[in-house]
Amino acid sequence: MGLRKEGLDMISQFFLILTLTVCPLQGLNMSDTEGVTYIHSNRTVAVADSVTLLCGSPPPDIFIWGFTKLDSDVNVALAYNYGHGPIVEALSTELGQLDVIANTSSLHIEDIHAEAQGIFTCQALYDEQQGFNTTFYFTNLTIVD
Ligand SMILES: *[C@@H]1O[C@H](CO)[C@@H](O)[C@H](O)[C@H]1NC(C)=O
Ligand SMILES: *[C@@H]1O[C@H](CO)[C@@H](O)[C@H](O)[C@H]1NC(C)=O
Ligand SMILES: *[C@@H]1O[C@H](CO)[C@@H](O)[C@H](O)[C@H]1NC(C)=O
Ligand SMILES: *[C@@H]1O[C@H](CO)[C@@H](O)[C@H](O)[C@H]1NC(C)=O
Ligand SMILES: *[C@@H]1O[C@H](CO)[C@@H](O)[C@H](O)[C@H]1NC(C)=O
């Protein structure tokens, strides 16, 4: 049990580092890896409105939310949960009021700012018998006045 948990932590830290250092918008090849699924969507929301972005249901064992600003290729971490409860990065305040909805991996943004225009990414990892099953969610968010 303890070992299992440590393993989970190590793997999740690896993925966190991966998220912070690798731009997931480049070099995607769906046929590359088995057990990896990519889900793309487009959303439009008005400034000061709220939006809920989904990242797997039932909630994944590990998830990491990131954001790539329009015209940028840097992906910054917004929120993550690797078994110790969700953590929302302070850095995310410039996008609006961010929350991870209780007992889910959904990212909720209230009073959204124009700065939130860009690609929201979420890596969802399910701990399965054959290993981790990963789903990448890419939500292209357009902010209108
Ligand atoms: C994806 O990778 C496979 C194997 O490396 C390659 O055969 C295929 O052409 C690639 N597809 C794209 C769209 O790059
Ligand atoms: C991985 O999870 C997705 C979504 O839940 C599911 O459709 C798929 O069958 C799973 N793949 C494997 C290899 O377990
Ligand atoms: C999102 O919008 C772009 C540009 O309009 C379009 O090319 C793409 O197919 C859309 N993606 C989805 C998943 O609808
Ligand atoms: C979240 O899950 C915990 C434990 O299962 C439960 O006690 C709590 O009521 C749940 N919260 C919500 C908002 O569903
Ligand atoms: C995101 O959506 C905007 C507006 O619909 C579109 O112009 C742009 O091409 C989309 N970007 C991607 C990566 O789908």
Image: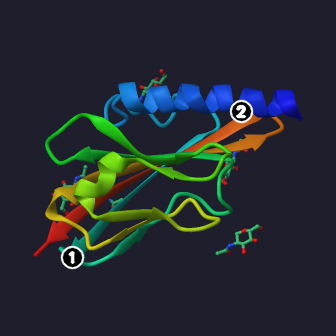
How far across and how far down the image is residue 47, in percent?
18, 74
In this view, the residue in front, 27 or 15, is: 15
Q: CA distance from mark 1 to mark 2?
A: 37 Å
Question: Where in the image, quadrant-wise, is ligand 3 located?
Answer: bottom left
Residue 123 seen from this side: no
Kind of residue at badge 2: Leu
How far across and how far down the image is residue 132, in percent?
70, 36
Residue 74 image-quadrant placement: top left
- Name the residue rendered at 84%, 27% in the picture: 3
Residue 22 image-quadrant placement: top left
Describe residue 115's horizontal placement relative to residue 136 as left or right: left
Question: What residue did someone put label 1 on?
Answer: 48
| Residue density around tag 2, few if under 14, some if 14–19, many if 20 or more, within 10 Å | some
Where is 45 relative to 82, above or below? below
- Name the residue rendered at 10%, 76% in the picture: 145
Describe residue 120's horizontal placement relative to residue 32 as left or right: left
Describe residue 6's horizontal placement relative to residue 1 as left or right: left
Identify the mark nearer the N-term, 1 or 2.
2
Indicate the secondary structure of the residue bearing disc 1. Answer: loop
Residue 8's label in the rendered image is: 2
Where is 93 relative to 5, above or below? below
Kind of residue at badge 1: Ala
Where is 39 relative to 123, above or below? below
How far across and how far down the image is residue 68, in percent?
27, 44
| Figure colour scheme | rainbow
How far across and how far down the image is residue 129, in percent?
84, 38
Indicate the secondary structure of the residue bearing disc 2. Answer: helix
